[in-house]
Image (cartoon, rainbow, N blue to C red):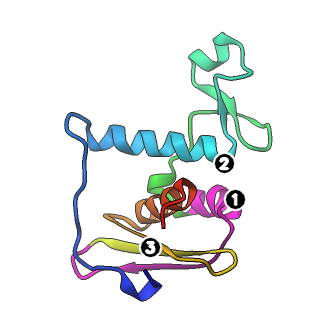
Amino acid sequence: MGTSGLNPVAVTVGVVGESKEKLMDDLNKKLAEWVGFNFGKDFPDIYSTHGYGSDPTGVMISGLPNFTESLDTCFKWLLPKSRVEAIKLMPTTSGGYGCSLIPEGWGSSVSALAETPALALCKAIQKLTDGAK
């Protein structure tokens, strides 16, 4: 699908029994691990139990970054590793946002729709990291 092929109709996809908040937490955790955040591994139990870990540069931090709510955080941590040539973020006619990413080498684009720009970008990056085209 090309970057102009985003469908402006919002579709809600969920998993029965899981809250939207849990799905966002799971996506944040998956993206944080993909980018190199470390929680639990290589840390004494006293630190990991209280939510301490390290960012990809090795700096100790408390709590995961919230990629799904912050474009700044996405641009700081996710985009450098995602290796995309082009990004297109746009509002849809249904009130949500669409995001299309064209990977390095101008391969097939990936697209996602969501309620916010940051969430649309996270979902598109997740598709890119999962190898979905």
Mark 1 to mark 2: distance in Å? 7 Å
Tell me the tag on residue 99.
Answer: 3
Q: Earlier in the sequence, mark 1 or mark 2?
A: 2
Q: Quadrant of residue 117?
A: bottom left
Q: Is residue 9 above or below residue 64?
A: below
Residue 133 horizontal/vertical position (percent) = 48, 68
Tell me: 15 left or right of 54: left
| Distance (Cα) linking label 3 and label 1 | 17 Å
Circles 1, 2 touching at the beta carbon (< 8 Å): yes
State the image coordinates of residue 96 (x, y, percent, origin top left): 29, 71
Where is 81 relative to 43, above or below? below
Q: Amino acid at mark 1?
A: Lys
Identify the residue under disc 2: 35
Residue 55 image point, x, y percent = 71, 40
Classify residue 113 as left or right of residue 40.
left
Q: Secondary structure at mark 2?
A: helix
Is 76 colored magenta in this rendering? Answer: yes
In terms of sequence position, does the residue under pointer 3 or pointer 1 come before the other? 1
Amino acid type indicated by mark 2: Val
Mark 2 crowd level (few <14, some 14–19, many ≥20, 10 Å Cα): some
Residue 90 image label: none
Which amino acid lies under the numbered mark 3 shown in the image of this protein?
Answer: Cys
Tell me the residue that label 1 is attached to: 81
At mark 3, the secondary structure is strand
Magenta part of the chain: 72-95
Which residue is located at x 50 percent, y 58 percent? Answer: 70
